[in-house]
Image: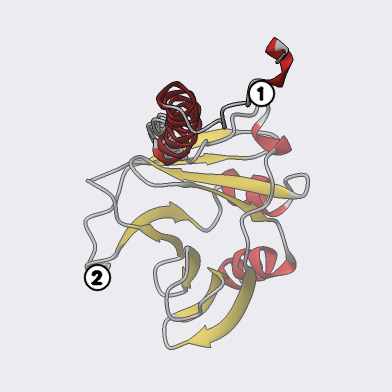
Amino acid sequence: MRLMTDRPIRPLHSKAARRLALGGAGLVILAALSLSLGGCVSSPPAPVAAPAPAPAPRPQPTAAPTQAVTPVYDNWMDAPQTPGDWSFRLIPTGVLAQFGTDPANPLFGLECVKATGQVLMHAPRASGGTLLLRTESMDRTLDPANLPGGPSYARYVVSARDPLLDAMAFSKGRFAALVSGAPAYYLPAWPEVTRVVEECRR
């Protein structure tokens, strides 16, 4: 008698087995395709930051134009001496002392005219300006004389015996000559001034 265990075992080549095998292989292929496709999908590009705007140029400060300031002194004798030197020479009419830095363009002059016994003061010509002379002991305002003095100079006349000349010669260190419309000159009372006065009184 045959036992049931003696039935022959059918090989695993049945249709069901093939379906299972094919189904498993399909899942493997699908999983591989999914991984492959997932690797091929590129991530979206990172946003590019917009460049920062260039800073606006700062306005450069404009230097204010400098203005020359004329110093003011409570006492004219405290003002600095005008640059220059006195010169002295003989001339056909007498003697002449001139002050300045350029002998060809003096700032002030004292001329003795022996024939008339007068001293002429030469100052740069202004608009018909008067001449104010200031000394330690006195001040005097002189009007321009009606004498030919050239286009650049005016002349002012005093007698050779006028005390104003002594005050100029012996003023403490300097005297001032101020022609209206022109700069003030602070002139040293050097020996040249005294020589003109002495020569004209002889």
Q: Earlier in the sequence, mark 2 or mark 1?
A: 1
Q: Amino acid at mark 1?
A: Asp
Judged from the image, the secondary structure of the residue bearing numbered disc 2 is: loop
Number of residue marks = 2
Residue 110 tag number: none
116 and 121: which is toward the camera: 121
Q: CA distance from mark 2 to mark 1?
A: 35 Å
Split into 4 quadrants, where in the image is the N terminus? top right
Q: Position of residue 194 (x, y in %)?
A: 68, 64
54 and 84: which is toward the camera: 54
Please tell me in which quadrant of the rendered image residue 75 appears: top right
Q: Residue furthest right?
A: 172
179 and 17: which is toward the camera: 17
Split into 4 quadrants, where in the image is the C terminus? bottom right
Q: Amino acid at mark 2?
A: Gly
Please tell me in which quadrant of the rendered image residue 67 appears: top left
Q: Position of residue 115 (x, y in %)?
A: 41, 75
Judged from the image, the secondary structure of the residue bearing numbered disc 1 is: loop
Apparent side of residue 197 relative to residue 36 in the rendered image (left or right)? right
Crowd tier of the residue under label 1, counting other residues whose Cα lies within 10 Å: few below 14, some 14–19, many 20 or above: few
Q: Residue furthest front?
A: 1
41 to 146, vertically: above or below: above
Residue shown at 66% from the left, 23% from the top: 74
Residue shown at 67% from the left, 52% from the top: 81
Residue shown at 49% from the left, 66% from the top: 109
Which of discs 2 and 1 lies nearer the camera? The answer is 1
Apparent side of residue 149 relative to residue 54 in the rendered image (left or right)? left
Residue 150 tag number: 2
Q: Position of residue 180 (x, y in %)?
A: 35, 40
Which colour scheme appears in the figure? secondary structure
Residue 74 tag number: 1
Crowd tier of the residue under label 2, counting other residues whose Cα lies within 10 Å: few below 14, some 14–19, many 20 or above: few
